[in-house]
Amino acid sequence: MIGFFKKTDAAPESWRPRLALASASPRRLALLQQIGIEPDGLLPADLDETPQRNETPRALATRLANEKARAGAKAAAAQDDLRGAYVVAADTVVAVGRRILPKCELAEEAGACMRLLSGRNHRVYTAVTVISPKGAERRRLVDTRVRFKRLSTGEIEGYLASGEWRGKAGGYAIQGLAGAFVVKIVGSYSAVVGLPLYETAQLLSGEGYPVHLMWLQGA
């Protein structure tokens, strides 16, 4: 019973279900840790993230989160220490209308994204999928609206020189330098960073993972 869990009690490691994060993203790892969840393993999937023909941003984020989770569950099943673990995966897509912005690898790509986002609203879709030890899949898609200030040429050039855009969906990370460009956000900040915390906790709790009980270990 939670009400009788004493601060001095040492919970045995066996009481805690195992959990794997199907991602190599340090941002998603840090977000999970923020709500007291320390993954037992990281199982990033090597997927082709190219949008399919006529695929919408919402559909792309959902499909990739599902594929990452399933690949992670398959990898976990092959490891003795992760077999039977919960698996969490997520994917983030930045879009202007139906136009999906790339995960920028070239300065030219990032520059084009910054000019497109300058002074306008865009949407960030983050899908999260949880697979339980019994194989049940639960998922949520979070839609967040973000507005950038109108960017000057100097601001864009300075941002590109920072290199922070590299590998980021839409060419920016809201928790980094580009946070200075954000005028307004409507929705989930953590989803824009890469993992919607409320929805992730709800999905895990719904499948029996003791999210809040974990906090007692630090009490």
Image (cartoon, rainbow, N blue to C red):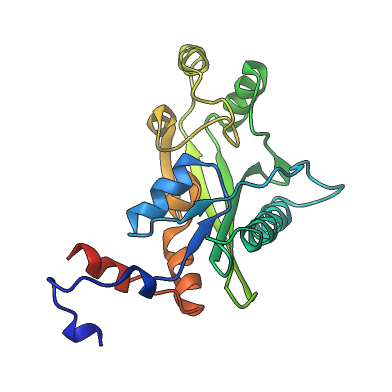
| Residue at x 63% of width, y 76% of height | 136
Residue 152, compared with residue 104, is above or below; it is above
| Residue at x 75% of width, y 52% of height | 56
Residue 188, compared with residue 8, is above or below; it is above
- Picture coordinates of residue 197, whole percent (x, y): 42, 59
Residue 60, compared with residue 180, is above or below; it is below
Name, please, the residue furthest toward the front: 80
| Residue at x 38% of width, y 30% of height | 180
| Placement of the C terminus among the 4 image quadrants | bottom left
- Closest to the observer: 117 or 202? 202
Name, please, the residue furthest toward the right: 53
Q: How many marks?
A: 0
| Placement of the N terminus among the 4 image quadrants | bottom left
Name, please, the residue furthest toward the bottom: 1
- Picture coordinates of residue 199, whole percent (x, y): 48, 66
Quarter of image, res 171 = top right
Residue 213, compared with residue 24, is above or below; it is below
Q: Is residue 126 shown to the viewer in this render?
A: no
| Residue at x 52% of width, y 41% of height | 25
Q: Is residue 205 shown to the viewer in this render?
A: yes
- Picture coordinates of residue 27, whole percent (x, y): 45, 42
Q: Is residue 32 left or right of residue 161?
A: left
- Closest to the observer: 186 or 141? 141
Q: Is residue 211 left or right of residue 60?
A: left
